[in-house]
Image: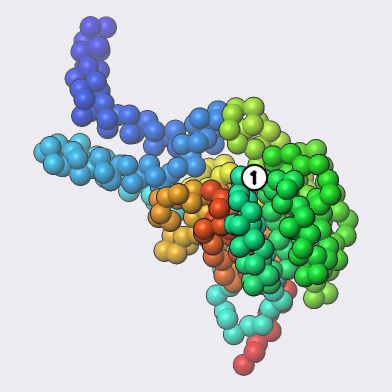
Amino acid sequence: MKKILKFVNKTVFKRDKAFLFFFIIVCLFSRLNSDFFLIDILGQLGFQIIVIGILLFFILLIYKKFWMSMSCILICLLLTIDILLSCSQCNAFLEDKSLSYNKIRLITFNTNSNIQLKNFDNLLELILFEKPDIVHLQEVSQRMEDKIKSLQSSFPYSIGLNKPRGHYDSIILSRHPLINNKLNDIHSIITSLKLNESELNIIAVHLFLGTQTDFNMAKKQMNYVKTLISDTNKNFILMGDLNMTPSSKRFTNFLKEANLYTYISYKQPTFTWPTFLPDFFGIQIDHVLFSKNFKLINKKTVNNLGSDHRLLIVDLAYGDGQNTN
């Protein structure tokens, strides 16, 4: 036993080795799809962990810890490869621009209920300028409701207005008639619309986050969404603040289990949170996910609207493409 303790003390608990050992443990935990809230948080921060690992690599190199620095950068490389390869359903991008498809534009935005009225006016102007088909707003305070109603001439159809709302409830605005509308007790909206002869099913949700109890509720919300998308022949769009990032196993497993797709570009990332940090330090927790009948045409974020989230705008193509040449 003494020999074991002596070995552990030499290999782990010296300061520089302790840092590397701790980094390895964090990396391993970050690749788990854990039911424990704090471990799940590590999974959402995969790329931030890689950045920390690269900084640790240079620190160890400066202090001439060559083998430890090489071990650190190797771990970063393996973690990067695992993250990049784990999301097989994150590449649904419309490659052939010569084909003509039906299109839908969507906006999802967590306003953060503390947003100032001036910023909310800017938000409404932006919505009118971008001309989306569907707008999904989350964490809307009661005092903003009258301002939202000013959009009714452009968005005559809505769900969630004139109703008491909790922190995780939503509002949907639409240019097109909405059918089969449902509001449920797990803070999601289910609706459908007919667009270009196709029926599109929209699910808007804000997943819980903050405590272990919230995390358990988020898993219930995710399971409910998976039951809704049991018919893979239908056109489904899931949108909202999902409080999980593409680097997490929870996200990639959810895509596979729900048979949903998205497009993630690490060359042109669309980080949506938090706004008080530069884009490249952020994470994407606001998403538009969709069934296999869709492809992403374009997506972008908009900052400086007074929330801790960036507004996300997504253009999707659907239907059978026809050659325009």
Horizontal and vertical percent for residue 146? 77, 55
Q: Residue furthest bottom?
A: 325
Residue at image point 25% right, 40% down: 56
Q: Which residue lies furthest to the right in this view?
A: 180
* Mark 1 crowd level (few <14, some 14–19, many ≥20, 10 Å Cα): some
Can residue 242 be seen from the camera position used here? no
Can residue 271 be seen from the camera position used here? yes
> Which residue is nearer to you in this view: 94 or 202?
202
Element at label 1: loop
Horizontal and vertical percent for residue 273? 51, 49
Left or right for 221, reference 33: right
- How many numbered tags mark residues here? 1
Left or right for 310, reference 207: left
Location of the N terminus (image quadrant): top left
- Establish if 8 lies above or below 265: above
Residue at image point 30% right, 42% down: 53
Left or right for 4, reference 271: left
Residue at image point 76% right, 52% down: 145
Horizontal and vertical percent for residue 287? 60, 54
Which image quadrant for residue 106? bottom right
Horizontal and vertical percent for residue 266? 44, 60
Residue at image point 33% right, 29% down: 22
Residue that numbered label 1 is attached to: 113
Q: What kind of residue is marked 1?
A: Ser
Which image quadrant for residue 305? bottom right
> Which residue is nearer to you in this view: 296 or 189?
189
